[in-house]
Image: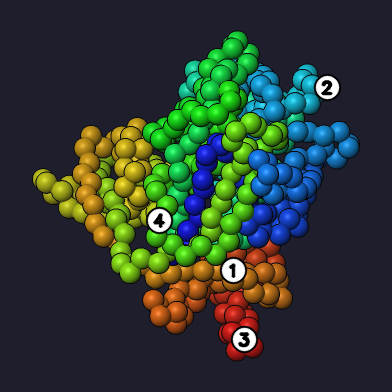
Amino acid sequence: MRIGYLECFSGISGDMLLGALVDAGVPFACLEETAVALGVGARLEMRKVSRGGLAATKVDVIALDTQRVETTHTHDDHPEHTHHGHESVEHHHHAHTHASHRSLSAILAIIRSARLTVSVKQRAIRAFQLLGEAEAAIHSVPVEEVHFHEVGAVDTIIDIVCAAAGAEWLGLTPGVARWFSSPLNVGSGTVVCQHGTLPVPAPATLALLMDAPVYAAGEPMERVTPTGAVLLRMLDVQYAPLPQMRVLQTGYGAGGRETHGQPNLLRLLVGEETSDDPTESIAVIETVIDDATPQLLAYVSEKLLEAGAWDVYRASVQMKKGRCGVQMTVLCRPDLVPTLQELLFRETTTIGLRWRMENKAALAREFVAVDTRWGKVSIKIARLPNGVIANAAPEYEDCRKIATEHSVPLKQVMEEAIQAYAATKENR
C-alpha cells in the first residue's frame, strides 16, 4: 500500500503542504489548473526558497488583480479573524478587511461546479464541512450561519482543493493509500481574533485537531493553522511513528518566514509499505434499527462515509417479536470509532450498538487515466503481492458523469474505458 508521511516538526499549513506536494513531484501545472478551475479570482505562484539552509518550495495564492493574497498559513504575522471570529479564515491583505463574506453553502457550490474529479470534490467538500462544523460549535451558531471572509475564503478554498488534487496525483487517496503524521508542533504565543488575544493554537485549530498528539517548540508563533488542521482531517491522517516503508519521493514545503533554530518546513515522505504482513486492523461497528425510514438511513450512510468510514452497508434482519429491522454495519479505522459512534447516536434512533476489531487483507491498488471519445476515465487497478494485475475496473463516478453529460449509456462508457485500458496495457 502507498504511504504518505508528514513530519510536522514545525507545524503544518495550507501553503506548506502545497509546497511539499510540489517538491515531492506533483507538477505545479496540476495545482495551477485546479486553482483556475475553481474560478475564485486567484492563481498560484511557486518559488524555491531556503529555510535553515535547506532548499524548499514555497507556494502562494495571488489575486488576479495582481494584488497578493498572502495566505495566513505562512505564519508571518498574527492572522485577522472576522465575522463570528472565524479562526479558519486568515489573511494579510488589509485593503480587503471590509470585503464581503461567503457562506459555507456558497463555497460548497463553487467546489461542486468546478471541472474537477469527483474524488477531489468529495474530499474538499468534506474538509469544508468539518471546518464549518468546528466554527459553528465554537461560536454556538447553526452551521448554515457560518460565513468566511471573502479573501481568506479564497485562500482556504484553493489550499484545500489543490491539496486534494495533489494527493490524488501522487496516488495518496483514501482506500488505496494511508497517511501518517508525526506529533504536531503547534507553536506557542498568542493569536489575535475578533474575541481578543487568545493562546495558540487558535480555537478552530484546537477543535479540528481533536485527540492529535501536540507539543510546542521553537520561537513563539502559530505553527498549525486551521487550514493545516483541516487538511490533516481531510487526509484521514493517523498519528504514529514512521511506518516500515520504502521511500520513493521526499518534499519540503516552506512556511512564509525564516525562523531561528528550527527550519520553518514541512517534510513529506512518499513511499510503499514494505511489511511482510498484508493484514491491518479494522474496526466494525454494528447497530440494528427498527424505527427509522429508508431516507434517514440513506442520509446517515452518507454522513458516515463523509466522516471517514471505509464502507457502510445495510441488511434486513428479523428482530424479536417478529419485527423487521435493518442492521447497519460500518467499517472504519480503529481511531475513528468514537467519532462514528457519536454520529450514529446523534443521527439515528438507535439506543445501543456494538463494535469489534478484525483483521483486513487487501490488494494494493492504484489508478491510471485513460482517454475515451468523451473524456478521461480513471481505471482502478488491483495487484497481487507479486505485482501481477488481478483486476482492473473503471471508476463508476467518472463514467456516470460522462454518461450524464453526453447522454450515452453508462455501460457503453464503461466498456470503452476498459477497451482503452486494454489497448494501453498492450502498448506498454
Q: Amino acid at mark 4?
A: Pro
User: How many residues crowd mark 2 within 10 Å: few (<14), some (14–19), many (20+)?
Assistant: few
User: Mark 4 falls on what kind of element?
Assistant: loop
Q: Secondary structure at mark 3?
A: loop
Q: Quadrant of the C terminus?
A: bottom right
Indicate which disc, 1 or 3, sits on the residue closer to the N terminus.
Answer: 1
Which residue sits furthest left?
A: 321
> Label 3 sits on what residue type?
Arg
Q: Residue at x 60, y 33 (%)?
A: 261
Circles 1 and 2 in contact, beta carbons < 8 Å? no
Quarter placement of the N terminus: bottom left
Between discs 1 and 2, the one toward the N terminus: 2
- Give residue 205's position: percent from left, percent from top: 52, 29
Residue 10 in the image: state x and y as whole percent. 56, 37
Give the residue pinned by disc 3. Answer: 428
**Spatial distance from mark 4 to mark 3, Cα to Cα?**
32 Å
Q: Which residue is mark 1?
A: 378
The residue sitting at the bottom extreme is: 426
| Crowd class of label 1 (few under 14; some 14 to 19; many from 20; radius 10 Å) | many
Dividing the picture into quadrants, the one containing residue 183 is: top left
Q: Is residue 224 above or below residue 57?
A: above
Percent across and percent down for residue 339 are: 36, 38
Residue 243, disc: 4
